[in-house]
Image: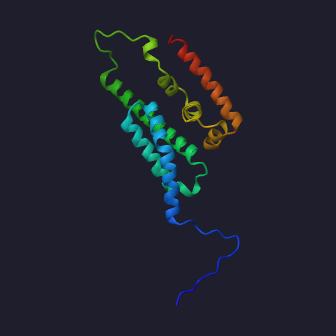
């Protein structure tokens, strides 16, 4: 004998797994391609970009019930993964310079600023608090409100960070002319 409990008014039942799968598929279909393309522009490696975008979606599956804005959440998580990648590359570069003594190859002149500085390297050189705001606002095309929500800051703080970032980027890129 089985017992059937009546449904109470105002009590929401958990969605069926197939509903969640369909919602996740819809988010994936809507955002994966652009997210992977955005990430590729940041890291300059399509395979790594797809790996990072996929990792962000794996994290989304784990956190699905707690995510209000999947697009903003995905871009914020991916920005953090890209930041971790850049940090790792920076540590690898430092270790390489220590190992090789930092000596430039013979017969090579130092490149001028115009060939050294690109928008990517300029953005990478920003402090974390500015870089993530720039990535989410300009490259992920999120609103100031969405960026503020994802970073846990006020909209005014995000606007200030974007202003400071633009000022820093302008100074860095001015010498690249």
Q: Is residue 51 left or right of residue 128?
A: left
Across and down, in percent, residue 40 comes to 43, 34
Name the residue located 58 percent from the left edge and 43 percent from the top edge: 72
**Residue 121 sits above or below residue 68 on the image:** above
Q: Is residue 109 left or right of residue 69?
A: left
- Answer with the quarter of the image where residue 36 lies: top left
Colour mode? rainbow
Name the residue located 46 percent from the left edge and 31 percent from the top edge: 42
Front residue (pair 42, 91) = 42
Name the residue located 60 percent from the left edge and 48 percent from the top edge: 69
Q: Is residue 110 left or right of residue 160?
A: left
Task: Report the number of discs.
Answer: 0
Q: Residue lying farthest bottom?
A: 1
Across and down, in percent, residue 173 comes to 53, 16
Across and down, in percent, residue 140 comes to 55, 36
Q: Residue lying farthest left?
A: 106
Across and down, in percent, residue 15 comes to 56, 65
Name the residue located 57 percent from the left edge and 21 percent from the top edge: 169
Front residue (pair 125, 32) = 32
**Residue 167 sits above or below residue 51 on the image:** above
């Amino acid at each position: 004998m089985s017992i059937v409990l009546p449904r109470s008014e105002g009590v929401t039942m958990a969605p069926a797994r197939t509903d969640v799968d369909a919602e996740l598929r819809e988010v994936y279909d809507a955002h994966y391609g652009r997210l992977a393309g955005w990430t590729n522009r940041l890291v300059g490696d399509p395979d790594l970009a797809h790996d990072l975008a996929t990792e962000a979606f794996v994290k989304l599956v784990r956190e699905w019930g707690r995510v209000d804005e999947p697009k903003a959440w995905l871009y914020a998580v991916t920005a953090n993964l890209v930041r971790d990648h850049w940090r790792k590359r920076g540590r690898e570069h430092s270790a390489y310079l220590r190992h090789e003594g930092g000596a430039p190859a013979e017969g090579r002149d130092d490149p001028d600023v115009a060939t050294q500085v690109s928008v990517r390297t300029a953005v990478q050189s920003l402090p974390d608090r500015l870089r993530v705001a720039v990535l989410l606002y300009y490259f992920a095309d999120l609103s100031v409100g969405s960026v503020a929500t994802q970073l846990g800051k006020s909209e005014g703080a995000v606007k200030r960070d974007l202003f400071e970032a633009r000022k820093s980027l302008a100074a860095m890129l001015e010498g690249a002319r």
